[in-house]
Amino acid sequence: MHLPSSDADTRPIWVLEVGGSHVTAAGVLLDDRQVIQRQRHPLDPALSADGIVDALAGAAKLLDPQAGDRWAIAMPGPFDYRTGVSLHEGVGKFDSLHGLDLRAALAHAIPATPGAFTFVNDADAFLLGEWVDGAAKGASRCVAITLGTGIGSAWLADGSVVTTGPTVPPDGEVHFCTIDGVELEDVVSDRALIRAYREATGVDVDGMRGLAVRARELDAAAQTVIDTAFGALGLLLTEWLTRFDAEVVVFGGSMTGAWDLIEPALALSLPARPVSDTEHAALIGAAWAAAHPDAAAY
């Protein structure tokens, strides 16, 4: 698929990719699948609403946008992506944005027209980017799993995000699933891995990063913790990937730095491809969603 040719297509779609501790601002030229002016800035998610809006708008202004340009904002949930209103509450990040119309706030602060903004879930943006020009390119049905402080997921069928129906977890979010009655992120997450290793050894580690170091040094307890957690995740994912009839699953997030340890434990039967630069994919995918509204319909 290609955007229709017009003068507007020579201008980039501007993207803000918002993470738990950063905002990355960039332009995307979709015809060339090219990311330009990529700039990463620190962002404190505990700031006041005004402080967060000022930080996002400040990053946006450094791109030197013009009137009439389009904007795509990749945001972590919970968020009402259709209206641009934050639903963050009690999640420890961006709680001050709860109930804020971020579309209106950014339109005023940048400034831009409210209609210029498209909001998209960050995991969905990642998968769209990999489907457009990455590890899931050309797949009819594909899935993304992000492994970091928590677990994110996205499900794509024929180029459109799927969030409802019997073939995907509730709201398309695998973190809502349970394993033997235990919430998934209490089994597989940095905090869960830290707790499991402490219970086994009495020693604290620096999350998956520290656990991987010990496992590569042939620490049996570290290897067991990894195998147990990701083995359980693999069984859960296999069930959902089969239901979805997925052709490929891409993995992103900070934990993919330990892919050599994670992949054998997952033991998935379909292609599982780690992506080192999830941010690049999310920028491409968010811009794609802005140009193709049906791709990330919520």
Image (cartoon, helix red, strand yellow):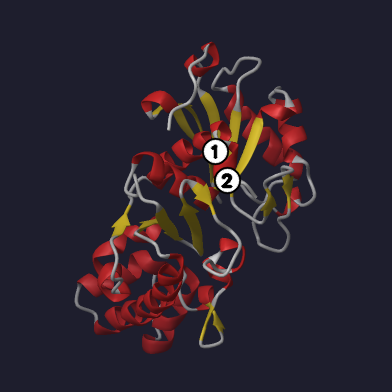
Upstream in the sequence, badge 2 or badge 1? 1
The amino acid type of the residue labelled 1 equals: Ala
Is residue 4 shown above or below 237? Answer: above
Horizontal side, residue 38 vs residue 55: left or right: left
How crowded pointer 2 is (Cα within 10 Å; few <14, some 14-19, many 20+) is rated as many
Disc 2, disc 1: CB below 8 Å? yes
Q: Element under label 1?
A: helix
Instruction: Name the mark on residue 280.
Output: none
The picture places residue 90, in percent across and down from the top left corner, at: 71, 64
Observer-nearest residue: 69 or 170? 170
* Residue at x 47%, y 53% (from the top left corner): 157
Which of these two is toward me, 178 or 294?
294
Does 58 sit above or below residue 244?
above
- Mark 2: secondary structure: helix
Q: Is any part of residue 76 visible from this angle? A: yes
Whole-percent x, y for residue 239 in the image: 43, 76
- What residue lies at 49% left-to-right and 72% top-to-bottom? 191
Q: Which residue position is annotated with label 2?
A: 296
